[in-house]
């Protein structure tokens, strides 16, 4: 973990309030694994403002890539950052997803929760696995990075609440279809999920007690991002765990909802 | 070469700069992002005899000028602390003294955790801003008599340098300072957070699960300087000052107001480089103003 | 149409919004820059029986999140106030009640200035954060017994709505609230500034000629909300809340925490438009959340 | 007095840390008289930062012009303001110089203290008077707006501490030469001064007790700028006066040093 001064390479709108930003971050990129996150000091906020945590969308060749949604004053201020600007980024932080998988690798993301799944899919693919990605959102515009998954040659199954893209409904609908199919075949699987709490809970339930594993990336408000303040608590079978250091990825069976 | 080491009531600090309890975990979490060679002490998170789960989340709210927190002193208890945390700290962080921040819900609880510390740590800091369950929930630190009692009990339980951490929300700090002095404290630390509350106006509920919390960070600094100044005038006990240190200037104000050492707290969250920047800035200030040692800054206001 | 008027212990305020004493002169200075139609009351600068020169300059220091001031209650005395200032105010500002903020160095001094006010003003606010010269310099507001005494004396001296302005630096606000209640106060106001100090590190002297001062502005808001919340739980007396109101959100937090009315202080210095912005924002909030009146917001936290 | 949203017209460096800035400020410009000042909300500072006061260098045809020196964080932040930006400016504030003069009008400025003297010289000139301007500074670069005075056809006598322009010495040296000359002639005069405290004191002493009048513009740290806070105190024979409302221009004989 390091606090690296990172030069912004690219920063663009993805539509509908989502943005893509990439940094020159050789040190962070070197050590990063999928599911880890970075803690960004947003330029333009007052000196005492807290950092903002973002999943690592991708780390490759010294580049750090993030996907983010503008939801409040921190992300709004981040919008103003321009290529060439230098930003303090702490990372890589937390414990990410395991990089092996005993069975079909089913990745499930909702909204910006898809962010850590691209990096994960890429590394699973590099090991010869064939991850299958399920993405959900309210509408077509909430489905992020579809082009990147396509370029990777990874299959994506989408669901939108309004049916504007993929199946109409929840991301768990196409997931359940696949789980039923796998069960019919007697196939094993592991679930890797990131997204809003209700989605994560639904995914976790589909793993716990099945003998299959679920890896759930939790999104908890953070202060330090390094395990020092105990703000970002997730209840687990081991008690109050810190999302930033024991997580953000937890085993589904350990989570207490 | 400016002499940067200081003696805080028997605790030999290689530099004048520490970290504030609760903002620096158990001391090793920031390895990689903080330059430990500039630290004179690390203060660990509050610890009591038994494990304690802390409050429900949300435990914090960002506010202009700082942070309101109600972590609620989550901790694993003194046994786990001594068995795992301290050795782990000593292995990762060499040469930086460790101050244990202790608390309890009764006088006996305080004494017990202090006693169990033995000499595994380098000093003990008592957080007296926790409710005294036996005395109906009033906090130990807000009645000089109760304060004196609990400090005396801890004094008997430990030979380590004993620092008492005072609460800021008092009409005058002087009776509390005197109570600590009389009860045998070796040093004072101040300030703890200022009681505060943030409301989510859309949901019409307190943001913190605990309803209220403590304000720390940039905005409380001028209030902290005043309390350090008042305390220093009232006692010879050395003072470890904290509250909104973000820049060298903030630390220098504390030293001139009478502090012997200074701790960085909330600032580390937004900028782990604060420790280095403050250290370098204070040393440069000493050079520029012809002070041979940081300790010469203590109380060195020109007004006399 | 949201009902914006409130009753503050007998003072009929056409709106829920006031100005804080000492930050709005004698009420007419901001004519031209502030929309007075949005004000429910103006609180004048502190006044006592005799003229008072205030402190030497510098009397203020800008700090992150606010201001530290030690104006020292400069004023022309009650006679001049009644003869010139009040008529001047009434001529320039129509329809906005005037609250006189009073102080003294003795119980008799407080009672005397209150008595002399007669009914020339619409309410009296007692600033009890000044040193009691007879009782050795301790401030009236920091001992519930002394507070009760001075409030009783003023209560006997005036029939006007009587507001007592409490100091924030206390372990618990409750005994002070009770003391005011028992002594016959009609309302409370809080918070006054938090004791603070700023040091000029280059000259190594306190910035303020008075050495210490009071912290106001944005940074103190979460501390003020907590005190209003605590006070409201302890009493039925209406509360005029102040401390770091810069945005509608800040005022709404105060109302939900239990305030009946809210005052803008330091924010006016940087933005005289604050009064309008806060007024408009609170009204819009009531509309959006289906509150027919601002007074329905008082204490309306969902937690019950 | 009004809090006007003013669009920046021009903003440029004058060298050596001084800058010129002009605004569209029809309402302020309309009411302004020389010696009054404006209170500027500096963009880029935190919302709670105090305003910064600046003398009105000129107010003409709806334009407000200021001259300022970068000395701290407020003026540094002001440097970042660009033409087209909108700035909250309160004004016109305070009591300025009298606009009549019984005798020779001698204007004395030091450093940025020259700011209110151009506006004054212009209006005195418009009344048919012939103001004579004395300007002082540490060095040549501290002598501001010489071109503007020249364009106005107003004579300027300069002094610099290092002799890099005009007489070597203090601005009171050429002033004293003129006072001696006038005294020889039995001529009457009035002094109008703005600058650092020691200069103002020296000028004030040259007026008090001579039967001539001195008008001294004081520079005191301000909070409200409108008489509401009592921060900006100047001691006078009438007690503690507020620089922002009873001043900034005081009669020399009223000042207590
Ligand atoms: C491990 C982790 C990974 C994340 N990855 C991504 C990502 O890849 N893309 C993305 O768009 N967002 C991600 N988020 C959420 C992102 O951190 C928040 O949306 C962002 O902090 C909101 O800041 P704001 O100032 O715009 O919003 P505000 O609501 O104004 O923020 C106010 C405060 O709340 C905190 N906060 C608000 N929402 C969240 C949240 N959901 N999580 C944590 N803190 C929050 C902020 O840090 C700040 O302290 C992640 C969060 C975590 C914990
Ligand atoms: C009536 C009046 C007219 C002025 N006219 C001009 C002018 O035409 N051109 C010009 O360059 N300057 C002028 N000044 C001075 C100018 O206001 C200060 O230089 C400026 O406020 C400094 O702000 P800063 O943040 O850069 O400095 P800092 O030192 O960082 O300011 C910190 C604090 O001190 C206050 N402050 C600092 N110096 C002064 C000062 N000299 N006067 C008042 N407040 C101060 C600031 O308002 C702020 O609160 C005038 C001052 C007054 C009172
Ligand atoms: C998240 C957080 C946790 C804290 N926990 C403790 C604690 O366990 N014990 C204690 O004595 N003080 C605790 N404090 C108070 C700090 O040690 C310090 O006194 C205070 O935050 C003021 O310093 P700062 O403004 O630099 O943060 C905590 C503060 C914060 C922000
Ligand atoms: C410059 C200044 C002068 C003040 N003078 C008085 C005063 O005369 N009497 C009083 O009761 N409070 C006085 N106060 C306190 C304010 O009325 C108010 O309680 C405090 O500033 C908190 O509100 P704010 O943060 O909105 O300013 C003064 C505050 C300031 C900043
Ligand atoms: S954010 Fe501090 S412990 Fe996780
Ligand atoms: S600056 Fe407030 S009275 Fe002059």
Image: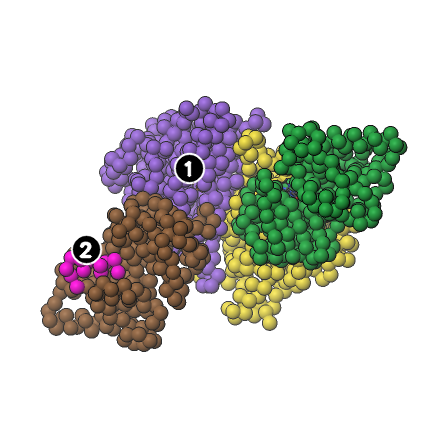
Chain colours: A brown, B purple, C yellow, D green
Read off the residue under disc 1.
B277
Q: Nearer the viewer, residue B190 or D253?
A: D253
**Which chain's residue wears label 2?**
A
Q: Quadrant of the C terminus of chain A?
A: bottom left
Q: Main secondary structure of the magenta part?
A: helix
Corner quadrant of residue C76:
top right
Q: Secondary structure at mark 2?
A: loop
Q: Is residue B242 above or below residue A178?
A: above
Mark 2 close to ligand 1, CB under 8 Å = no
Left/right of residue D75 with respect to residue B58 in the rendered view:
right
Does residue A121 belong to the magenta stretch? yes
The reply to whether residue C42 is visible in this rendering is: no
Residue at x 72% of width, y 43% of height: D150
Q: Quadrant of the N terminus of chain A?
A: top left
Which residue is most to the right?
Answer: D186
Instruction: Determine the quadrant in which ligand 3 lies.
Output: top left
The reply to whether residue A149 is visible in this rendering is: yes
**Which disc, if any, is residue A97?**
none
Q: Position of residue D246 (x, y in %)?
A: 75, 44
Corner quadrant of residue D232:
top right
Q: Nearer the viewer, residue D6 or C16?
A: D6
- The stretch of residues the image draws in magenta is A118-130
Does residue C220 belong to the magenta stretch? no
Label 2 packing within 10 angstroms: few (<14), some (14-19), many (20+) = few
Residue at x 33% of width, y 57% of height: A66
Left/right of residue C268 with respect to residue A49 in the rendered view:
right
Left/right of residue B182 with respect to residue B121 in the rendered view:
right
Q: Nearer the viewer, residue B304 or B175?
A: B304
Residue at x 48% of width, y 33% of height: B252
Q: Position of residue B35 (x, y in %)?
A: 34, 36
**Which disc, if any, is residue A99?**
2
Q: Position of residue C156 (x, y in %)?
A: 70, 50
């Amino acid at each position: 973990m390091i606090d690296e001064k990172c030069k912004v390479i690219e920063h663009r709108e993805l539509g509908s309030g989502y943005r893509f930003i990439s940094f020159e971050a050789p040190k962070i990129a070197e050590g990063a694994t999928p599911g880890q996150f970075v803690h960004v000091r947003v330029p333009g906020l007052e000196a005492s403002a807290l950092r903002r945590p973002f999943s690592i969308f991708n780390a490759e060749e010294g580049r750090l890539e993030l996907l983010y949604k503008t939801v409040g004053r921190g992300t709004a201020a981040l919008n103003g950052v321009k290529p060439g600007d230098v930003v303090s980024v702490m990372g890589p932080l937390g414990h990410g997803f395991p990089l092996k998988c005993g069975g079909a690798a089913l990745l499930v993301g909702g909204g910006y929760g898809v962010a850590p799944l691209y990096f994960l899919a890429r590394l699973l693919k590099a090991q010869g696995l064939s991850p299958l990605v399920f993405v959900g959102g309210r509408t077509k515009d909430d489905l992020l990075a579809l082009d990147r998954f396509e370029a990777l040659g990874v299959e994506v199954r989408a669901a939108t609440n309004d049916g504007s893209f993929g199946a109409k409904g929840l991301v768990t609908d196409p997931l359940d279809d696949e789980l039923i199919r796998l069960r019919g075949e007697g196939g094993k699987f592991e679930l890797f999920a990131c997204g809003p709490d209700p989605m994560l809970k639904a995914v976790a339930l589909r793993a716990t007690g099945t003998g299959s594993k679920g890896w759930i990336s939790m999104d908890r408000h953070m202060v330090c991002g390094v395990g020092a303040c105990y703000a970002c608590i997730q209840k687990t079978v081991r008690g109050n765990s810190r999302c930033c250091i024991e997580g953000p990825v937890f085993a589904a069976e350990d989570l207490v909802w | 070469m400016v002499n940067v080491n200081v003696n805080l009531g028997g605790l030999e600090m290689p530099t004048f700069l520490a970290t504030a309890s609760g903002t620096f975990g158990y001391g090793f979490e920031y390895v990689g992002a903080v330059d430990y060679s500039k630290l004179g002490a690390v203060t660990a998170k509050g610890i009591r005899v038994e494990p304690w789960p802390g409050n429900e989340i949300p435990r914090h709210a960002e506010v202009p000028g700082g942070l309101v927190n109600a972590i609620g002193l989550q901790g694993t208890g003194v046994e786990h602390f001594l068995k795992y945390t301290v050795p782990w700290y000593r292995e990762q962080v060499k040469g930086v003294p460790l101050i244990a921040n202790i608390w309890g819900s009764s006088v006996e609880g305080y004494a017990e955790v202090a006693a169990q510390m033995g000499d595994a740590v380098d000093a003990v800091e008592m957080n007296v801003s926790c409710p005294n369950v036996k005395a109906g929930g009033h906090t130990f630190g807000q009645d000089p008599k109760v304060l004196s009692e609990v400090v005396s009990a801890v004094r008997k339980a430990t030979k380590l340098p004993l620092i008492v951490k005072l609460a800021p929300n008092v009409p005058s700090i002087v009776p509390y300072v005197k109570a600590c002095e009389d009860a045998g404290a070796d040093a004072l630390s101040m300030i703890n957070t200022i009681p505060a509350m943030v409301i989510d106006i859309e949901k019409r509920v307190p943001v913190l699960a605990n309803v209220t919390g403590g304000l720390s960070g940039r905005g409380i600094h001028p209030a902290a300087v005043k309390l350090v100044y008042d305390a220093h005038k009232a006692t010879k006990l050395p003072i470890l000052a904290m509250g909104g240190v973000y820049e060298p200037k903030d630390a220098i104000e504390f030293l001139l107001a009478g502090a012997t050492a200074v701790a960085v707290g909330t600032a580390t969250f937004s900028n782990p480089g604060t420790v280095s920047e403050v250290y370098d800035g204070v040393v440069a200030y000493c050079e520029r103003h012809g002070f041979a040692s940081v300790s010469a800054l203590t109380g060195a206001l020109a007004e006399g």
